Image (cartoon, helix red, strand yellow):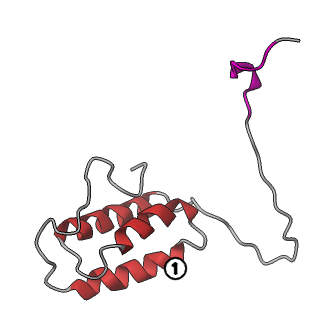
Amino acid sequence: MSCPLDLSHKLIAEAGEFLDDPSIYRRGMGKINFLTNTRPDLAFAVEHLSQFIQSPRVPHYNAFLHMLRYIKGQPDFGILLHRNSDYTLQAYCDSDWAACSHIEDQ
């Protein structure tokens, strides 16, 4: 699973049957919302699914379950916070300037 949301389904607020117990969806979304602190890959999906908190329906819950499967399949994604006091930000970039067509030879 490569994406937190299933890209082949468009979620609509009024589509589908209501959940029998919407509190399951609401509690689950609250817990996953907390994960966005260390899992920025979930931020868009959580924001999108949070739009349906007021009256969640079966397709929204299915998208939520899809996101849970994504999280289970990608446990090593995210930001790892260590105990040491060194908070130096490190970033890596793999640039391919040779493939950039707008740079001219000089």
Q: Is residue 57 above or below residue 8?
A: below
Quarter of the image holding residue 24?
bottom left
> Residue 76 appears at what percent x and percent y?
57, 60
Residue drawn where x is 25% and y is 70% of the image = 61
In the image, which residues are magenta? 95-104
Left or right position of 37 against 54: right
Q: Secondary structure at mark 1?
A: helix
Is residue 9 found inside the magenta-colored segment of the image? Answer: no
The amino acid beneath tag 1 is Phe
Residue 50 falls left or right of residue 62: right
Indicate the quadrant containing the C terminus: top left, top right, bottom left or bottom right: top right
Report the residue at 35% width, 85% height from top.
27
Residue at image location 84% in from the left, 70% down from the top: 87
Q: Which residue is mark 1?
A: 34
Picture coordinates of residue 58, whole percent (x, y): 17, 70
Whether 47 is drawn above or below 53: the answer is above
Q: Is residue 83 left or right of residue 4?
A: right
